[in-house]
Every structure is written in C-alpha cells, then in structure tokens.
Image (cartoon, grey):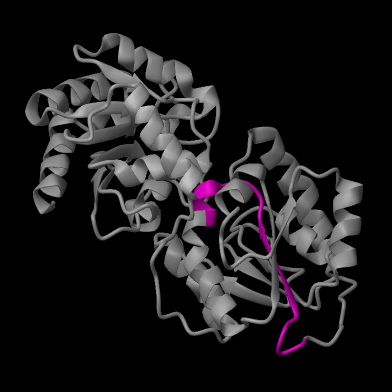
Amino acid sequence: MQSNRFQQYLDRYLGIPLNLLLSLFPKRSPIPDTPKKILFIQLSALGDTILAIPTIRAIRRAFPNAEFTVLASPTNLNYLANCPYIDKHIPFRTPAPRLFAQLRQEDFDWAIDLEHWPRLSVLLAYVSGAPMRIGFRTTKQYRHFLFTHAVPHTAGRHEVRNFLDIATRLGCPTLEFGLEVWYAEAERAWVHQTLVQESVSRELPIFVLHPEAGRRDEPRRRWPVERYVALADTLVGRYGAQIILTGAPAEIAVSQEIARRTKHRVVMLAGRTDVNQLAALFAEAALVVSGNCGPMHLAAAAGAPVIGLHGPTNFAQWGPWNHNAGVVCAQIPCSPCLNLGFEYGCQALPDGTSPCMHTIEVARVLEACERLLAVE
C-alpha cells in the first residue's frame, strides 16, 4: 500500500492500538469450509494488485461457485474492471460509515487482506464481520491480531510467491503463476487510433519509457531525467526506435522535460491513458523501460519486454514477473533498503531522487536493452 507520512503515522499510532484493543473481544463465529462470499482487500497499490492475481485466480478455481468481491482504490478497480475472477467491486473512496455498513450487509464468509503493512485493511476485514480473516503477519508491523489465520510475509522473496502462500494456506492448488491484463477492444482501438494520430509507424519498433516510479511527490525511485534523455537518444540512433513517454496526470512535467531535451522526436502520452489503455499500449511495445512502480508490473503482465530499474527497491521482491524481462540494480552497499515500500534508508537528493538511482549508468541500461531485444 502506498501512503503519505501522515497516513502512515495515523495508521501506526491509531491502527496498532485499535487492533490490539479489538483483539481482546474475539469473534468466534463458525468458519465455513466452503465459502459462499469472499472479500479481497487491496486499498491502493496497483503493483500489489497485479502481483496478487495468481493468488486470486487460484482461489477462484478452488471455489468456482463463490461470489468474489474486491474492496480497492479506483485505479485498482479500473484494472480489475474486466477481470473474470471478480464478481463485485467496492470503491475504497466510499465514505467510511457507508462503507462499514455495506461491508456488514454483504455477510462475507471469508475476508482476505492482500496488504502487507497497513493496519487499516485489517480493521476493514474485521468490520466486515467475516468469520474467517486471513492476511500477512509482517515483521514489526503488529497487524495480525484480528486475523483468524496469519501468513508470514517474507522480506526479499518475490511478492507473487508471498501472495501465493495465502492461497496455499487456504488449501488452494497453485499451479499457474502468470500475471494477466484484461483490456477490451475499445482500449486496443484507442491505442491504434492514437498511434496513427501521433504518426507512429507500426513498421518501426516502439519503445515506451515510463520515467516516474512511485507515488505522487515521492520521486526517490525515479532514474535521473538526464539519463532518460540519453537513453532515448541512443535507442533512436541505434534501433530507429520511436519513443513514447507515459505517466499519470500528475507526472506530466517529468515527461515534458525529457521530451524538451531529447535530440529526436518523442511522443508524449503521459497523462493521456487510463490503466487499461496503458496496458494495451504496453502490449504493442517492443520494449518498456521503467522504475519499480505499478506500470512496470502492468507492462510485465501485458507481456511486454520490460527493463526494471531498481535502486531502493529489491528486484528479488519487486522485479518484473515476466520471462521476457531484465533488471538493472543500483551499485551501492545500502541498496536495496525497502521491504514495505516507504522505509528509505537515506535522504533524497535536491531533485527528489535517491543517491542509489544515480549509480545506474546509461551504458548498463543499454546493455540490458540489447540483451532483451536480442531475444526477440
């Protein structure tokens, strides 16, 4: 889950006492072996939702007749709009009293918390009234007291495998590990129309650069702008590539700066795509380069060849889950420093980036691109 510092402070210093207090009054309702209604909770992080799909799919196949509901942020719900494993959606932005009432009215049998550090998601699982509540026991996060079943979260192990431990604990076979996207024909048509409008030839390779990495106002996972500029210019010169820059509406400025400084023409699509349009675009790309963020995982799920740039983040835990992927990691002793996503080990530089991201040289990224493109 992504969160600002105030939310982290509130979640910790209010959430932990509430979890402890409510755990003194345990609910002892019978737990059904075959659930009729299952609630999944994933509040904000798109990447976590994408990486949890193999787990949701495994549980769906074990309980094909159950009704699956997901409580998630609007972006996650957009990603899941056409997901065949989910029957109902509850937006997390719903006002709290109405949300609590809705959760109680649904009469869930199981509540599955897919977060790994927030206490809020645990409280929502408890409020739902589900007799069976399962989620991660994460070291030093004190969030598991209200679960009826807790699964250890293992730092440094890929999150896909951590999530799959939940399915295993529930007795569900985990035989397929692949990620998925479900963009519709409308998103595919939008991409094709946009490429025509932007004079992007389908005869030349399309390379997508997603320069931002992480939540708004937290650019410490971002590779420096000048290196994206150098990468873009070299890729155009070496491969005759057409460069497309992507990003959320709040991330337009970074892409604009890169576009202004490149020697060659680039196409600006930052701020112009929703999550499923972005997935459809990635599916058309010969290469995607991105820092560790939700769109990097989206590109991997779409089957695009993707290079993930990792500084504070551990590639073993958060790397792109795709056979056709590569990673370039920082070369500094204290990297990686993140397990939960916010506990940075050093102060940001004046431009907001982390010192470790500056140890990733353009030449190393180009070598990774060459290796990946040679597979094609």
Q: Position of residue 241 (x, y in %)?
A: 17, 29
Q: Residue at x 51, y 75 (%)?
A: 165
Q: Is 186 colored magenta in this rendering?
A: no
Q: Residue at x 90, y 65 (%)?
A: 105
Q: Which residues are magenta?
A: 32-49
Tell me if I can see residue 232 in this picture. yes
Q: Residue at x 36, y 13 (%)?
A: 257
Q: Is 48 colored magenta in this rendering?
A: yes
Q: Position of residue 122 (x, y in %)?
A: 73, 61
Is residue 178 toward the left or the right of residue 241 in the image?
right
In this rendering, the answer to whether 121 lies above or below 243 is: below
State which quadrant residue 207 falls in.
Answer: top left
In this rendering, the answer to whether 105 lies above or below 76 is: below
> Viewer-proximal residue, 206 or 221?
206
Q: Position of residue 89 (x, y in %)?
A: 71, 56
Q: Position of residue 112 (x, y in %)?
A: 67, 69
